[in-house]
Amino acid sequence: MFIDGKWRDAQNNAVFDVFNPATGEVLAQVPDGSDKDISLAIEAADRAFSSWSALTAYQRSHYLYTAWKIMLDKKEDLARIMTREQGKPIAAARNEVQYGADFLLWFAEEAKRVYGQTIPSARPDQRFIVLKQPVGVVGAITPWNYPVSMITRKLAPALAAGCTVVLKPAEATPLCAMEMFKIFEEAKIPSGVVNLVTTLDPKPVGAQFVSNPIIRKLTFTGSTRVGKMLAQEAAAHMKRISLELGGHAPFIVYDDADPVHAAKGAVLVKFLNTGQACISPNRIFVPRHMVDAFTKEFTLRVNAMKPGNGMDKDVRIGPLVGPDAVSKVENQVKDALEKGAHLITGGKRLTEGPLEKGYFYAPTVLTHVTKEMRIYREETFGPVAPIIAYDPDDDVIEMANDTVYGLAAYVYTKSTSRAMSAFERLKFGIIGINDINPTSAAAPFGGMKDSGMGREGSKEGINEYLETKLGGFSI
Ligand code: ADP
């Protein structure tokens, strides 16, 4: 763990194993932090806050810029660690490191653009000035599916704003977090400004983040279940929160879209990270008369994707994160098939040869998916593409909005008016119009409804770490 500028073991010397999900092998043992370690980290962040927040924006920017340069130098090392620890194909891991580094550069720049306001007063003897100030010490909790970029997406704006941070990464991917902290150390970010607590049991960290009065802000990316629980507890202590939670993205193909082009996009985004992404399509709506053409092209592409260890450069489908993830996918597919879905391809665990020791599930295509099936409502977080036929009389936007989630949605159409109408009517935070990658450090990322609150990236991302202070001056 990295606390107060030093690498440390857990106070009680406990450790836990980190596994490679493609091979089942133990990669490393890392400290299993507990309450005492979390308190030490929070206290270190508290001590560092006054001097870090007092630096000029230019000084903080310089640290982030330095970290960005180091991160790019280490791109290949980071990508390899990520593939071993998390399983995504090496090319996708390289993309993620680049995306992660983008946040350091973006917020190195935004640090210098934290503008206040002056506001005219109705009183001649009065002046209003609005100041933006850092919220204080931040507790950050990140998931395993994007183990590098979720760290920079939170830490870069926090540091830019003048906050200090305690990070708890997911228990499946502490090695990526440790590599990131080596970068922060090399960038000479002052002691206590960034602290890392690794632990197998996240509950005590969550409990301290929401209840310890030093922590003024909690930023969380993970499941809706845990996010809601933390939000509830944080409310009791009036902590600022931002939450990036689950999703159930619709992917709408209109009848004027080219089915081949749409199928190509749908496969690429559906199987990204083996479906383990909160922006992964979970319901693919296709006009009934186009289902056959779309499914044919889609399946052709799915069957061409090689599953296996992500270190093999030909592999396109990595393992799932663990046995529970495989069971969840299996159960959803079983439920769908029992209720009348048709299995076009996949539908089983992959256990042949070297895949036996990892957590592999075949990329799967289901058609005839209906509302009664669990997969229609529940996030899958796995490599299953449910295709749903719709009729000319159906309001497909209404069907797409019929979910508790509101993170990402995708639309394929050649019509500008349809595209605009869908863009305006869809109740989701991120809409891809003929576009499967509507994400960037420069663009706001976040969801509505049960997908969370707050935005990361863009000029909005830094606001999550700032307080607004008004000064009324009588002169
Ligand atoms: P997933 O299902 O994607 O693993 P989780 O919400 O369980 O989603 O995990 C996301 C992050 O939340 C991880 O860092 C995990 O350790 C953390 N987490 C899980 N349960 C809790 C909890 N009770 N309190 C705080 N953090 C938690």
Image (cartoon, rainbow, N blue to C red):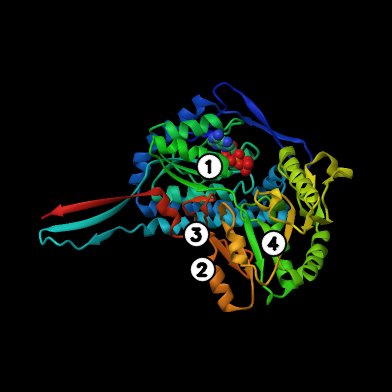
Task: Identify the disc placed on residue 424.
Answer: 2
Q: Within the image, what quadrant is residue 24 found in?
A: top right
- Up the image or down, 405 lies above or below 291; here it is above
Q: Is residue 406 left or right of residue 134?
A: right
Helix, strand or loop at label 2? It is helix
Three-letter code for the amino acid on which mark 4 is drawn: Ile
Residue at mark 4 to residue at mark 1: CA–CA distance: 26 Å
> Dot 3, crowdedness within 10 Å: few (<14), some or many (≥20)?
some
Quadrant into which the N terminus falls: top right
State the CA–CA distance, disc 3 to disc 4: 24 Å
Can residue 4 be spotted in the picture? no
Give the labeled residue for mark 4.
284
Q: Residue furthest right?
A: 353
Q: Nearer the viewer, mark 3 or mark 1?
A: 1
> What amino acid is labelled 1 in the image?
Gly
Ligand 1 is within 8 Å of the C-beta of the residue at disc 1: yes
The residue at which mark 3 appears reads as 444
Q: Which residue is mark 1?
A: 227
Q: Where's residue 106, x and y in %?
A: 48, 59
Q: Amino acid at mark 2?
A: Glu
Per the image, label 3 sits on a secondary structure element best described as: loop
- Ligand 1 within 8 A of label 4's CB? no
- Nearer the observer: mark 2 or 1; the answer is 2
